[in-house]
Image: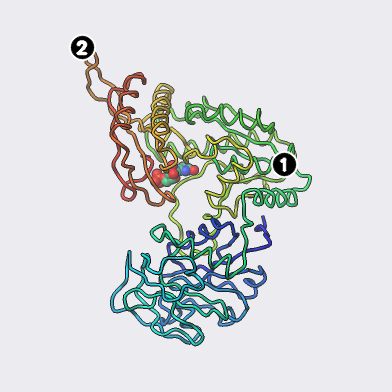
Amino acid sequence: MNSPQPEEMVVVLDFGAQYNQLIARRIRECRVYCEILPHDTPLEQILARRPKGIVLSGGPSSVYEENAPTVPPEIFEAGIPVLGICYGMQLMAHVLGGKVRPGEQREYGRTDLTVLDERGLFQGLNPRLIAWMSHGDRVEEVPPGFVPTARTGSALAAMADYERKLFGVQFHPEVVHTPWGMEVFRNFLYQQCQCSERWTPASVVAQLVAAVREQVGKAKVACALSGGVDSAVTAALVHRAVGDQLTCVFMDHGFLRKGEAEQVVQTFRENFHVNLIHVQAQKRFLDRLAGVTDPEKKRRIIGEEYAAVLEEESRKLGEVQFLAQGTLYPDVIESGTRQAARIKTHHNVGGLPETLKLKLVEPVRYLFKDEVRAVGEELGLPGEIVWRHPFPGPGLAIRILGEVTEERLEALREADAIIIEEIMAAGLYRRLFQAFGVLAPVKSVGVMGDQRTYGNTVIVRAVTSDDAMTADWAHLPYEVLGRMSTRIINEVQGVNRVAYDISSKPPATIEWE
Ligand code: XMP
């Protein structure tokens, strides 16, 4: 599927720093569409997108190294405003005749910054600011035509050539530790690039719906719903675009959260009137998992069974030519711009079989997760779906350590629902990346009334994270943990103990299997 073609866009050239996706997210938060392109994208290709601005990102290299990534000098002569961030600023200085040297000491973390020139990027900001730094090299001499616009201690922190609209900042305006960084982006985008706030949820929906219509024509489309936000928004977009040409397949493998299946069926079949095949395969999956305790074996069996059931179901679909899939922009960026292979161990159940030879429709391919949520709200999807925490494809089966049985599923589903209810009641749901219960494979002794019990253990897991690659255990208030524990032990049959997981990722993972 082609990328959207909004009237205004900004290009971010990726030089490999870890914060680069954040740059794009901040620009989109300013309601300006932008795309991240590899740093070696030919200049003609960049200009062909008619960008209103170009951002050169940070990166791990040094400009004076052999084979350091660079840009052709013509990029600065195209009449397009350019913002260089960290390595991007050093590169701008280096290419245009300034001097870049290794710093005697690295500047890292919170640093006092003094604004020298309030025009340009610092308009409307306090002249004394706290900036977030992370660099070794520094610009010692600005290139001809530039003036220094900010300093930290004795070092140059920003520069500008107002004539050519070229700007460099040594600090990171994209990170949350630089709270006024959004102002820097706004100044660059609105004042210098003359962009306006056109990338709104309503305009995104209109563009994506038009693009799906154009791609699909009169053909039929299938979409596998998982209950998660990405596939739900994808289905809702495709439905808005081509109505009854879409059929959704929702597989209930029996490992979903409490009320999840009902929610999906209600939303799509009853509210949106989408053609929906609700595959009730709970028994098939449970039968195949009987006696299985090894985590990888569970995942493999679930993956195989999923493909087998979908294959059977898809034969009933008739003449389908397209498959709608909820691929997100971070996956596209990772595969397009990163040289290093990504470590991905998750077998993502959810796709229809390859043997069907379907063409892909990926309407949210250029969106970040927060944008997918905004689009979901714009399309009228319920908050429970739009804001629901991520959930692994194999579902509760990999949160029940040891054998998965109907009884254990029921216990975990109830405990998990209590955990979520208490987190919502405390107003913490959206601040957490994920919160859920895990059923441990051990029993322990307890006492209830005057009776000895020998019952199950539920482990509460709650984490904060940006992207699931790293995660911190959440510091939930004791009162919230206390209420969860009391309710789980009182309300869930067979559970007499609740524990809280205080491990971060790495070295632990978010899920237990
Ligand atoms: P871990 O446990 O590796 O999980 O820290 C990272 C994120 O991925 C989710 N997860 C999965 N998602 N299929 C998925 O679609 C899977 O098999 C799977 N396993 C883990 C997990 O919930 C977390 O958000």
Q: Which residue is found at the position 45% from the left and 69% from the top?
A: 58
The disc placed on residue 400 is none
Q: Which residue is mark 1?
A: 320
Q: Nearer the viewer, mark 2 or mark 1?
A: 2
Q: Give the quadrant of residue 44.
A: bottom right
**Ligand 1 image position (quadrant):** top left
Report helix, strand or loop for mark 2: loop
Classify the position of the N terminus by image quarter.
bottom right
Report helix, strand or loop for mark 1: strand
Q: Give the quadrant of residue 296.
A: top left
Left or right of 400 in this view: 378: right
The three-letter amino acid code for the residue at tag 2 is Asp
Q: Residues within 10 Å of mark 2 (few under 14, many from 20)?
A: few
Answer yes or no: disc 2 within 8 Å of ligand 1: no
The three-letter amino acid code for the residue at tag 1 is Val
Residue 143 vs 489, above or below: the answer is below
Left or right of 33 in this view: 283: left
Q: Nearer the viewer, residue 512 or 84?
A: 84
Q: Which residue is found at the position 60% from the left and 69% from the top?
A: 193
Q: How many marks?
A: 2
Answer yes or no: disc 1 within 8 Å of ligand 1: no
Q: Which colour scheme appears in the figure?
A: rainbow
Q: Which residue is mark 2?
A: 450
Q: Nearer the viewer, residue 175 or 15?
A: 175
Q: Position of residue 186 (x, y in %)?
A: 53, 63
Residue 369 vs 99, above or below: the answer is above
